[in-house]
Image: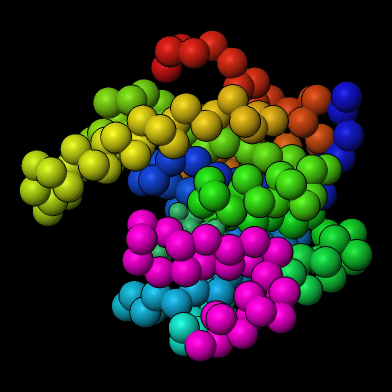
Amino acid sequence: MSRPSRLVVLAGPTAVGKGTVAAAVRERHPEVWISVSATTRAPRPGEVDGVHYHFVSDEEFDRLVAADELLEWATVHRVARYGTPRLPVERALADGRPAMLEIDLQGARQVRRTMPEALFVFLKPPTWDELVRRLVGRGTEDEEQRERRLATAREELAAEDEFDVAVTNHEVHQAAEELVALMTLGHGSAPSERSAAPGGS
Ligand code: 5GP
């Protein structure tokens, strides 16, 4: 049961903090290789092409899809397309490096089909109320948008059962350390909780 899992796929509901946890792993564990996704969305202030994302045009994204250069891809929040370049993942794995993808649920489901041997980790909020706070806390959405986001979050949380293991994001560094432990120890012996206990938050 306890096998080292080189490729970890990290997914979870919107606003749970996947990006922040991945950034903490990047900062504290340079031995872990983290995939840089291609995206059609525009860079945010401070984001560097080739570091945070490969920022590409719609045409270039079409080409990547047509050439089968993406391991998975999805349209996220109906706004932009995101995908994982296939070759760098294969190289990292061939080099024997622990590797991680931080992607959305649709992408995780695709990787589940093509690389079922990966370890699928669901990042979850400490409680439903905490997720609601992170989702709507900014107060910039109107009532309808808020309802839609909450409905999506409810659906996304229900996906936990599809994953091998769940890590609760109580605090970013604790979650990052649990993830790294899962990569290096294998999930049979990691300190994380198993995905079980519906309503246990
Ligand atoms: P953001 O635009 O805030 O950086 O990311 C938005 C969402 O896109 C996040 O949920 C993130 O996990 C997801 N995402 C980032 N890269 C990829 C990718 O390569 N593939 C998929 N399917 N989703 C991604």
In which image quadrant can residue 118 be found? top right
In magenta, the rendered stretch is 59-85
Q: Is residue 154 above or below residue 11?
A: above
Q: Is residue 180 visible?
A: no
Residue 130: percent from left, percent from top: 30, 30
How many discs appear? Answer: 0
Residue 138: percent from left, percent from top: 17, 49
Q: Is residue 198 above or below residue 195?
A: above
Q: Looking at the image, which is closer to me, 146 or 176?
A: 146
- The question of residue 68 being in magenta is answered with yes
Residue 101: percent from left, percent from top: 64, 56
Q: Quadrant of the C terminus?
A: top left
| Figure colour scheme | rainbow
Q: Is residue 196 visible?
A: yes
Q: Is residue 94 above or below residue 141?
A: below
- The question of residue 105 being in magenta is answered with no
Residue occupying the far front of the picture: 66
In which image quadrant can residue 161 be found? top right
Q: Looking at the image, which is closer to me, 117 or 22?
A: 117
- What residue is at 58 percent from the left and 63 percent from the top? 73
- What residue is at 34 percent from the left and 75 percent from the top? 44
Residue 165: percent from left, percent from top: 65, 29
- What residue is at 83 percent from the left and 66 percent from the top? 90
Q: Does residue 57 appear to the left or right of 186 in the view shown?
A: left
Q: Quadrant of the N terminus?
A: top right
Q: Does residue 87 appear to the left or right of 159 in the view shown?
A: right
Q: Does residue 48 appear to the left or right of 149 in the view shown?
A: right
Residue occupying the far left of the picture: 142
- What residue is at 9 percent from the left and 42 percent from the top? 143
Q: Looking at the image, which is closer to me, 79 or 23?
A: 79
